[in-house]
Image (cartoon, grey):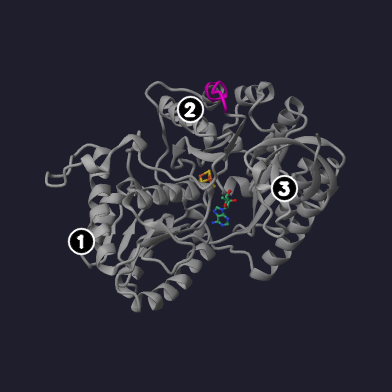
Amino acid sequence: MYNEIDLDKINLDLAPPMEEPARQYYFIAKCRRYVRELEKKLERRLCFFVQTFGCQMNARDSEKLTGILKMIGYEQADSEEADFVIYNTCTVRENANNKVWGRLGYLNTYKKHHPYMKIALCGCMMQEVEVIEKLKKSYRFVDLVFGTHNIYKFAELVASVLEQSDMIVDIWKDTDQIIEDLPIERKYSFKSGVNIMFGCDNFCSYCIVPYVRGRERSRKPEDIIYEIEKLAADGVVEIMLLGQNVNSYGKHLKDSITFAKLLLEIEKIQGIERIRFMTSHPKDLSDELIEVMSKSKKICHHLHLPLQSGSSHILKEMNRHYNKEQYLQLVEKIRKAIPDIALTTDIIVGFPGETEEDFLDTLEVVRKVGYESAFTFIYSKRTGTPAAIKEEQVPEEIVKNRFNRLLKEVQEIAAKKASAYTGKIEPVLIEEINAQDENLVTGRLSNNFVVHLPGTKHMIGKIVDVKLKECKGFYFYGEVVE
Ligand code: 5AD
Ligand code: SF4
């Protein structure tokens, strides 16, 4: 394990080892030497800043970047005015890209007055050919660009950046490698994401993820279990299993295993009290999983089940492999087996060719399912996806109108769902001091509802029984029940 590795014992006069992760520890030690030398010269500590865009997968990747930068010896800064700034980017919708382009302008100005500053970019957006071309042409002040497949090589890339001043661009098209045992610095002490698989093979016609994250690869169950055992020993009580489509976990492993069986193994780990996962594709959600969830004491009663559209015609165009009726039947089955389950979803409005009738189908499903919460998105055209070349793009005004109607519906239903919990006593994992009021702490129910209650920082990471006194739409005010 990485926290047992002594960097001082690595002989930097020798050539770097070829095997991983030993090779990366060699480069961490090398970077550490460079950083110490520079700190001596500048007579101050060097610091880093990691900015994450996008999903939980990226958040977890950023913890890996942070772990490596800390081991190298950089201190963590809380703003971009730092010596090493890295943006871990997202490209799922166009506005994610725009945010990065906007902030790069600011970084350039800052760097002009800070000659030792290094700027790095990684993540999904970097897997796009046009992005790389634009960076090479107009953003020469960026020092390092790498993608989603070679993030494990981060230390090696940082070493190159510290050795020379040219822009380094290292993008891989795909990989079948999964490197275990690199340093990770968790954001929270009591909860953690755990990757169980990488990539996606579904090719929904609007989605760029399969192109930028590559083919589906599952981690071996024993590596996952080992990681979670270590997390539990370190005080983690809640884990979130991460994958683009967790329901197809294990399909490509030599000893194939289902996601439900993996959950059964994880459930046995002492110290872990809550298990969450995301994301589930409705087409692969098995009866076995529903059964395991219904019997489990640790798997949270929350399922994120992206609908995307309620129209069977649009679902076909989206390449989702289920129709409206199948989705509704699945929901019925889940609710029957686990009556108190909270269902959440993702919905896209304005997919090419979406008619008013299609949209009304979506509203109908939303009403029938009664989601506890839903993420609603305006369709964003992603170059390279099949949907991008469809001619029947929906006019902006119509999309906005539908989006607002959907949002209103979703919010009303969610508020109604939440208010039904008022007065109940539920176990709540306390996560943080409330951002607005320091006399309050904020926590989550098993079903993912948020609750604010009087408390202190000593409660963080503990599960306490809370009476939900007042519902404020999608969150509650409560108090601890002794
Ligand atoms: N436009 C809008 N939303 C999208 N999503 C994925 N691709 C697009 C796109 N091109 C949404 C889907 C997915 C969520 C993570 O992002 O709803 O479930
Ligand atoms: Fe994108 Fe579909 Fe894969 Fe989800 S399942 S990442 S929406 S292609």
Identify the amino acid type marked 3.
Answer: Ser
Which circle, 3 or 1, is nearer the viewer? 1
Q: CA distance from mark 3 to mark 2?
A: 32 Å
Query: In front: 111, or 311?
Result: 111
- The image's mark for residue 345 is none
**Label 3 element class:** strand
Query: In front: 335, or 464?
Result: 464
- The image's mark for residue 229 is 2
Q: Is residue 327 above or below residue 223?
A: below
Query: In front: 384, or 29?
Result: 29
160 in the magenta segment: no
Mark 3 residue crowding within 10 angstroms, few (<14) / some (14–19) / many (20+): many
Identify the amino acid type marked 1.
Answer: Glu
Q: Residue at x 86, y 41 (%)?
A: 420
**Label 2 element class:** helix
Q: Is residue 289 above or below residue 370?
A: above
Q: Please state the extent of the stretch shown in magenta in the rendering.
A: 265-271
In this image, 9 relative to 467: left or right? left
Residue 255 image position (x, y, % from top left): 40, 21
Residue 32 image position (x, y, % from top left): 27, 53
Q: Residue at x 77, y 35 (%)?
A: 426
Question: Disc 3 designates what residue?
Answer: 373
- The image's mark for residue 163 is 1
Mark 1 residue crowding within 10 angstroms, few (<14) / some (14–19) / many (20+): few
